[in-house]
Amino acid sequence: MKNKDFDSMNIDELWSLHEQVTSTLARKIGQEKAKLEERLRRLQNSDNTISPDRPRRAYPKVHPKYQNPKNPAEKWSGRGKRPHWVQAQLKAGKRLEHFLIAR
């Protein structure tokens, strides 16, 4: 509807239109809320949720792959953030292959 249509309506017609819009909005908001609550309920009951009650999956032990030549007690598996000794050696021009542990 255009503004001209509203201007030509009397107060009773405008009030009736206001009540229709209000009731329609309330009904549609209620329906949408019910859909969202049902969706939330399904998500909460899903078996795929991560909960603190579930034990963590057992991961296999990762053996060290690299060893510090200056301190053999310092080892790194190659996963995660690089240790400081690896970063320092790489900055000095060495390559990661220099620190591989022989198997």
Image: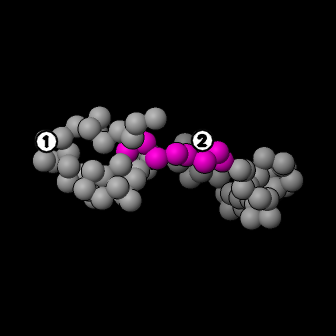
Q: Position of residue 32 (x, y in %)?
A: 77, 50
Q: Residue 67: which disc?
A: none
Q: Residue at x 30, y 42 (%)?
A: 99
Q: Residue at x 79, y 59 (%)?
A: 54
Residue 62 in magenta stretch: yes
Crowd tier of the residue under label 1, counting other residues whose Cα lies within 10 Å: few below 14, some 14–19, many 20 or above:
few
Provide the residue designation for mark 2.
Answer: 1
Q: Position of residue 86 (x, y in %)?
A: 27, 51
Q: Name the element at disc 2.
A: loop
Q: Name the element at disc 1.
A: loop
Please give left or right for residue 8 compared with residue 77 in the image.
Answer: right
Provide the residue designation for mark 1.
Answer: 93
- Residue type at tag 1: Gly
Q: Which residues are magenta?
A: 59-66
Quarter holding residue 18: bottom right
Q: Reading the chain from its start, which is encountered first: label 1 or label 2?
A: 2
Q: Compared to 5, does 85 lie above or below?
A: below
